[in-house]
Image (cartoon, grey):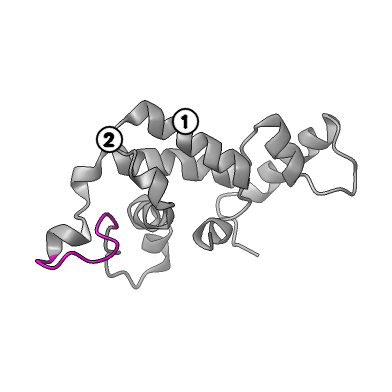
Amino acid sequence: MELYLGGTLPIFKIQKRAIRIMGCKSRAPCRNFFKKLEILPLKSQYIFPLLLFMVNDVDLFIAISENHNIHPRQSSSRPLPQANLTIYQQGVHFSGIKCFNTLPPEIIKITGNLNKLKQALKKFMNTQSFYTLEEFYSI
């Protein structure tokens, strides 16, 4: 289970309780109900603006293809900075790059059009309904 910093576990439990009040059975998993109602779970609500930050400020992050003369397979991905501190790895800069590199290629292709990207990201996040960052990284 992922470490929940800043007291987000109680908020996520309240969110799940609200979903159960809306009609999800008490012992049934809430994930499908999140998808049905098109409500993003708490971690998905964190990932969504993090990815938008990456796309809006893409010039702050160097692509791998800009670093090398050879065109690697994942030329649009960004290299992760060297970081030994866990607190830095949990920060916006490091997590943003890691999340961006995890996105499917069909979504990365739309990064030029912000409105289409938002729609595609929202649809992707709703269909997956991520509860943790590890779930997102494992797609």
Element class at badge 1 = helix
Element class at badge 2 = loop
Q: Residues within 10 Å of mark 1 (few under 14, many from 20)?
A: few
Image-quadrant location for residue 54: top left
Total number of numbered labels?
2
Residue located 50% across and 43% down the image: 46
Residue segment shown in magenta: 68-77
| The label number, if any, that marks residue 119 in the structure image | 1
Image quadrant occupied by the N terminus: bottom right
Image-quadrant location for residue 68: bottom left
Please give left or right for residue 81 compared with residue 17 in the image.
left
Please give left or right for residue 18 compared with residue 11 in the image.
right
Amino acid type of the residue tagged 2 in the rendering: Gly
Query: Is 5 above or below relative to 85?
Result: above
Distance CA(mark 1)–CA(mark 2): 13 Å
Q: Which residue is mark 2?
A: 112
> Which percent across, then down, holds residue 138?
53, 63
